[in-house]
Image: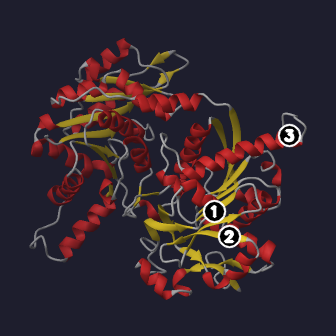
Amino acid sequence: MTKNYIFITGGVVSSLGKGIAAASLGAILKARNLKTTIIKLDPYINVDPGTISPIQHGEVFVTEDGSETDLDLGHYERFIHTKMTYLNNFTTGAVYSQVLKKERRGEYLGATIQVIPHITNAIKERIILCSKNSNIVLVEIGGTVGDIESLPFLEAIRQMAVDIGRKNVIYIHLTLVPYIATAGEIKTKPTQHSVKQLLSIGIQPDILICRSEHTVPLNERKKIALFCNVPVNAVISLKDVNSIYKIPKLLKNQKLDDYICEYFKLNVPEANLREWEEVIYAEKNYNNSVIIGIIGKYVKLPDAYKSVIEALKHAGFKNKIKVNIQLIDSKNIENKNFKTLKDLNGILIPGGFGDRGIIGKLLSIQYARENNIPYFGICLGMQIAIIEFAQNIVGIKEANSTEFDPQCKYPIIDLIKNWHNSTYKYYNKKENDINLGGTMRLGSQACKLTKNSLSRKLYNQEIIIERHRHRYEVNNLLLKKIEEAGLQVTGRSKNNNVVEIIELSNHPWFLACQFHPEFTSTPRDGHPLFIDFIKSAGKHKENFKIYYKGKNV
């Protein structure tokens, strides 16, 4: 089958949801038995998002092969049943870095290096490389039309229509159609100007997806079609909805997939979106509700914990429990103000870096442990749980991580090279205190689970594969006393050298893991750890009510 490309651009303003739109369209096309993949092109100069603050850019999504990528790749994986790789996301910085390395090696034979053709050729080569095993390749261009840093990407996708044939390329442009409440009108002019900007660089959109607060009426869609030179049935209204999982059906109801298949002359079966209907049904039909507190340091931007939030929701679907999430700044707990914790049915501490807010997280774990509140620690959340246990149960008051205190007397958490060189070599990572990029344990790795543990019961298998993103590990040299005091290590790396999962057996639900299970959760299947955590939170709520003699608290 011929390879076809769908390029998705955005206009007017950013954050309109190109990633969700691309993922939703990919889900529909995948449901039509088309081999589909999605690529995200990011215009910033960073080589990858690994060193960007989550407050600026949201979470860093880690792929199976260990690539640090844009959070949209999480949506892609959750929507289209496909594992992303390093090929599915690249930045302007990565492209320029690749071209400059070739120039230094003399591979351009003395040519003057220019944006056209050298940079645009590099972009096209990477797109084609990623499309190797797919029939349909969706390519999302980050940012908005008119951004100076996006121009090389836009020029490259303009050239691709010439290179591979216009009949094998569709340009989709996603724009804002604002509703002016005081006038009671929907305004199409921003979309017209955005398309004009796109035309000025040689791209005529084939399909317009119009983001709006309300459904864009037929008359306004006809007006947009007339001014923007597209058929009216190619003007798609994407109104605000209360769940991203409704968007595939919303797009299919407007026959966007039919239009694309007719354009590409594809003879494929109709899309069966039954699994999405089941997800939507599960999302709105529940028997109970719980409040889960995410104690973090990047709470100003919920996208910093996007995969964790989605994984909690997925677990709610499987338990018929509505999950209400509270993002709590750990600094607010540093003065032992536990007011924000008292109504929680579960406490989760996700990954993070640096020492800011650590005291509040330690106090939150202590509160969860002493008050029998279900606790789930992820990555940093596991490391802090071990430190809290060492300080308050074992009595090692000076226990800490060298990430927070490089000179601490008892480094319970430390760089692995400082206590086990052979293990450090096993992971083949070069630690460099100056260059922070690519110095972590990244990607999918095996973990062995001990018999009769909660984690073994939940996974129902001895060996599991989960994704990692961290630089520090549990120091085995100081672990013996902690285990003797009752903290169970129930998961270790395949070579037994690195702690992966800890549990407390004398607690209703206390489990923490070094890896990131949120990255592999999907709305259809959930993840076993998250599912049982939410189940335990539901039990905590019921027990809490019984304790207060049925009073609805």
Residue at 78 percent across and 50 percent down: it is: 341
Say which quarter of the image contains residue 359: bottom right
Residue 176 in the figure: left or right of residue 119: right
Residue at 30 percent across and 26 percent down: it is: 256
Q: Look at label 2 and name its amino acid.
A: Gln
Placement of 345 over or under 394, stated as above or below: above
Say which quarter of the image contains residue 13: top left
Query: Which comes before the other along the chain, label 1 or label 2?
Result: 1
In space, the residues marked 3 and 2 are separated at their CA atoms by 30 Å
Placement of 463 over or under 315, stated as above or below: below
Seen from the viewer's position, the closer of residues 109 and 360 is 360
Marks 1 and 3: which is nearer the front? Answer: 1
In space, the residues marked 1 and 2 are separated at their CA atoms by 9 Å
Residue 294 in the figure: left or right of residue 152: right
Q: Which residue is mark 3?
A: 546
* Residue 20: % across, % down: 42, 39
* Residue 148: % across, % down: 32, 50
Q: Are marks 1 and 2 in contact (CB under 8 Å)?
A: yes
Marks 1 and 2: which is nearer the front? Answer: 1
Say which quarter of the image contains residue 75: top left
Circle 2 residues within 10 Å: few <14, some 14–19, many ≥20: some
Residue 355, visible in the rendered structure: no
Which mark is drawn over residue 379? none
Q: Look at label 1 and name its amino acid.
A: Ser
In this figure, which colouring scheme has been used for the structure?
secondary structure
